[in-house]
Amino acid sequence: MFYLSKIEHKFALPPHLLARPIREAIQSELERLFLDKVIQKLGLCISVYDITSIEGGSIFPGAGAPTYQVVFNLIMFRPFPGEIISAKVMSLDADGVRLSLGFFEDIYIPTHHMPYPSYYISKNNTRKWTWEYGEETDEFNIEISNEVIRFQVLSVSYPTIPVEQAKESKPFAPMVVNGSLYHEGLGPVSWWQ
Amino acid sequence: MSLVRFYLLLEMKILEENAGALTNFEVLDFLRAKGASKDPSRVLAKVAMSEYKVYDYLVKTPAGSQTRESVKEYFTAIKQHDLSEAEVLNVLNIRPASEVEIYHIIEDCEERFPDEEVTEIVEKVGNTLPAPPDKATPEEITKGDEETETQKHDEISQDQTEDGEQMDTS
């Protein structure tokens, strides 16, 4: 799920941080710049792991802040295809299920990767996906709850930022994980105990 | 709900896309060293909100009860088996407790490993890695009656050695 990525970044250190020891100031600024942000192909940045080197510190003409060139390692959340991850159901609809890890919420299981055969049922204020296993028709359900669901990662995609978005559409997700619940052992943990 | 924002960084260079994989435990360990914890003093630590969300997630997974020694032991023990790096990681992060769970994690398991080896792997996982946080406390409320305790243990081990998916009978 997690990888280290080594980054080199040149940036200006805001003057209000200059009273602090240099490492602390740079750590603080790096966290402000990278934490909880998505970098294409690298994933979601979780933490600044360490700072390898700090160079520079010169103030360019016309600038009010010193510029530093820093090499550092970031902890990135980047699930690999085939990885099995535990998550919780965030929402469901006829197109599939959306799962969440708390710190990352754009995990989608499309209809054709639900256990086979499954049906989406929406009535009386309850919405659920039901898996028909053998004779059982109401035993295996996926609903919004605190239950732990295991899914397998199919792919991770980084859609490009749309230039314009319709007002009603979902907020743009820079990183999307596509998953599957198809194989044995996936789905709510309670199904397999 | 945290909104993941996209950031265009012009002066940023990726030196190494993959400078090493981290196990769930290593990330949890890192956050703990930074000061993350479950008790109320957590607000004083220099841990960001988004980092805390990762901590809160990991602490409930099997990594939550793992230790450095147990993870080291696991890596040594698992080396004897022909598992890919991804499978070693998956097994560590999920901590399967039975053969059935292993079949789900390891591709073509029945073709690559004889049944005895699969049982061996399950045993090694059970011996080196502690039980996940939610299973660490005993499920039965034993009332100090020794006879019923041993009886219940026998029942549990019987359930586990039977093949196939068994519905939870307790």
Image (cartoon, coloured by chain):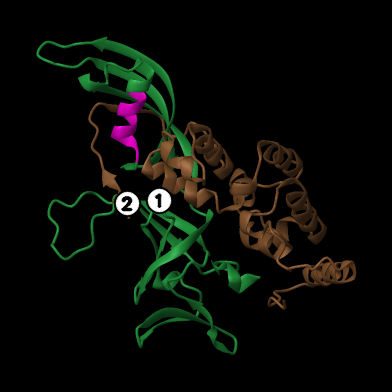
Where is mark 2, residue-wise? B2
Q: Eyeballing the image, is B30 above or below A131?
A: above
What is the quadrant of the C terminus of chain B in the image?
bottom right
Residue plotted at (48% across, 52% down): A81
Chain identifier, brown in the render? B
Q: Nearer the viewer, residue B170 or B27?
A: B170
Q: Relative to residue B111, is residue A64 drawn left or right?
A: left
What is the quadrant of the N terminus of chain B in the image?
bottom left
**Cβ–Cβ under 8 Å for marks 2 and 1:** yes
Determine the secondary structure under disc 2. Answer: loop
Q: Is residue A12 visible?
A: no
Q: Given the image, on which type of amino acid does mark 1 rest?
A: Phe
The x and y percentages for residue B92 are: 64, 48
Determine the secondary structure under disc 1. Answer: loop
Residue B96, quarter of picture: bottom right
Q: Eyeballing the image, is B41 above or below B94?
A: above
> What is the drawing colour of chain A?
green
Residue plotted at (82% across, 71% down): B152
The reply to whether the magenta stretch includes residue A31 is: yes
Q: Eyeballing the image, is A155 above or below A26?
A: below
Magenta stretch? A26-35
Q: Nearer the viewer, residue B111 or B77?
A: B77
The x and y percentages for residue A150 are: 53, 63
Where is mark 1, residue-wise? A103
The CA distance from mark 2 to mark 1 is 7 Å
Residue A144: which numbered mark, if any?
none
The reply to whether the magenta stretch includes residue A55 is: no
